[in-house]
Image: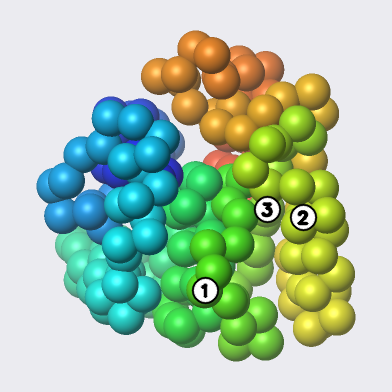
């Protein structure tokens, strides 16, 4: 699931990389083709999202994957970045067909996640120097998952900032941390979706 910037080339590249790793991938366009050029535009687009419509879109994406001829099995994984990271947790909470949820540096969007409803295994990968998702927010998430008795692993990548996985943003991209996190993502998905 895409960042606040929308369905940009970096997210399409993530899908391509997953496909090269023999993982069927689909990236829903939650902005329905709208594009953003500035951070202010991105924040406005996030604020304009209708949570019910987003939920229906995400359920439809899960159904589309499950009905795809290349998908083997009855459960899927969800992966999201920034805004999409939080949405991956929301999708897991609302859809029991999700077996694995990955949150890359997703912060709360004002829509709470019903952690008790999540049956999926969760992997959260965050940035130590994230100006949008505080260390306190990550710790609160970790404590909430622990208190609910859920299977969740949270990792904080040292020395990197928000969007460190985004290779199209040289001001943000951290190659070593990104490659390490990519390997963790693949191992997690393979283990949970096998």
x and y percentages locating residue 66 in the rendered image:
28, 70
10 Å neighbourhood of mark 2: few (<14), some, or many (≥20)?
Answer: many
x 60%, y 62%: residue? 108
x and y percentages locating residue 132 in the rendered image:
63, 43
Q: Which mark is residue 95?
A: none
x and y percentages locating residue 181 in the rendered image:
64, 34
Q: Secondary structure at mark 3?
A: strand
Q: Which residue is mark 1?
A: 111
Please determine whether, in this image, residue 62 is positioned above or below residue 10: below
Taking depth in this image into account, of 158 and 121 the one nearest to the observer is 158
Q: Which residue is mark 2?
A: 138
User: Do labels 3 and 2 touch, CB within 8 Å?
Assistant: yes
CA separation in Å, label 3 and label 2: 9 Å
- Marks 2 and 1, the one that precedes in the sequence: 1
User: Do labels 1 and 3 touch, CB within 8 Å?
Assistant: no
Give the label, 1 or 3, closer to the camera.
1
x 45%, y 72%: residue? 91
Q: Residue furthest top?
A: 170
């Amino acid at each position: 699931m895409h960042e606040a910037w929308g369905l940009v080339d970096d997210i399409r590249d993530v899908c391509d990389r997953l496909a090269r790793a023999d993982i069927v991938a689909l990236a829903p366009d939650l902005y329905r083709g709208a594009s953003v050029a500035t951070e202010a535009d991105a924040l406005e687009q996030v604020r304009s999202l209708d949570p019910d419509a987003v939920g229906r879109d995400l359920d439809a994406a899960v159904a589309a994957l499950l009905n795809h001829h290349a998908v083997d099995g009855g459960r899927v994984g969800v992966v999201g970045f920034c805004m999409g990271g939080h949405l991956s947790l929301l999708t897991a909470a609302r859809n029991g067909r999700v077996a694995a949820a990955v949150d890359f540096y997703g912060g709360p969007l004002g829509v709470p996640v019903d952690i008790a409803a999540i049956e999926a295994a969760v992997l959260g990968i965050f940035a130590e120097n994230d100006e949008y998702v505080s260390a306190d927010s990550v710790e609160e998430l970790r404590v909430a998952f622990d208190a609910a008795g859920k299977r969740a692993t949270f990792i904080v990548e040292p020395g990197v900032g928000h969007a460190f996985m985004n290779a199209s943003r040289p001001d943000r991209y951290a190659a070593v941390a990104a490659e390490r996190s990519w390997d963790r993502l693949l191992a997690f998905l393979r283990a949970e979706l096998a």
